[in-house]
Amino acid sequence: MHAPIFAPSLLAGNHAHLSEAIERIERAGPDWVHIDIMDGHFVPNLSFGPETVRALRKTSDLFFDVHLMLDNPQKYVQNFAEAGADLISIHVEPDYAVTDTLKRIRRLGCKSGIAFNPSTPVSAVEPFLDQVDLALAMTVQPGFGGQAFKTDVLNKVRELVGLRKASGLSFRIEADGGVDRQTIPLCRSAGVDTFVAGTSFFQAAQPRDLIALATG
Ligand code: DX5
Ligand code: ZN
């Protein structure tokens, strides 16, 4: 349905030299970079803010795939859109007006995504699938890079593929967390078309080979 996309995650890059991390992604070939935003509440960690996105926007034409791990994403979507996000994903778990926020993301000129944690059932995101460009399946508990891939989430990916087909929708399906040489083939066969990889990308001796596993 979609040409596969590989989106390296900036979280695993060198935070003292983020523009170099972006250059490394550009040299390896991907068109997307995944940028994780954490608030210390929805997840027990902090990462980047809108000013980071704005500064990087000046240095790069990559597609900015911004993943908000926030309790109150509705308060910040405008900041990230104005800072240069191309796609903004928000989580389904916190208590806020999800549909309104997805609409705002599109009105701000961005593509929209709905993200869900490994323990969240697909039924929680199903009501929003007709409002998004991408469904983001967390394949680790969000908050940190370098964790082990949760294989059981692939059943949810298969469920999403089924729902997409049954409903005639065309959202992308993104896997995020623990995506590496071993798990890319599993993701592919389950129906993932958008691969986020932090640790495995930045540690790869031959990142192009890793990317080819997903996109070749
Ligand atoms: C985790 C983040 C991921 C993270 C993935 O909360 O959403 O995007 O960067 O890192 P790896 O690929 O190292 O699991
Ligand atoms: Zn992410």
Image (tube, helix red, strand yellow):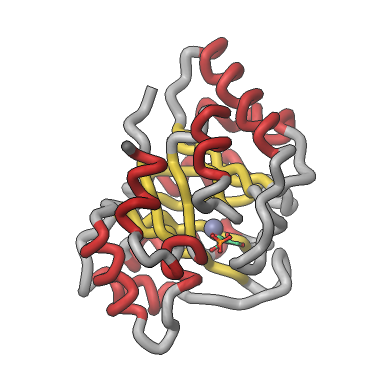
| Image quadrant, ligand 1 | bottom right
**Residue at x-position 44% and y-position 35%:** 193
Relative horizontal placement of residue 183, taking residue 20 as reference (left or right): right
- The single residue placed furthest to the bottom in the displayed view is 16
Res 44 quadrant in image: bottom right
- Looking at this view, is 53 or 73 the one in front? 53
Q: Where does the N terminus fall, quadrant-wise?
A: top left
Inspect this view and state whether residue 195 appears: yes
> In the figure, 153 relative to 28: above or below?
above
| Residue 210 picture location, percent across and down | 39, 52
**In-front residue for pair 130/37:** 37
Q: Position of residue 62 (x, y in %)?
A: 26, 58
Seen at 47% across and 13% down, the residue is 168
Q: Which residue lies furthest to the right in this view?
A: 119
Give the left or right position of residue 168, taking residue 161 as reference: left
Q: Position of residue 176 (x, y in %)?
A: 56, 51
Residue 208 at x, y = what percent? 30, 54
Q: Residue at x 34, y 61 (%)?
A: 206
Please say if 102 is above or below 206.
above
Q: Can residue 78 be seen in this view?
A: no
Q: Quadrant of the C terminus?
A: top left
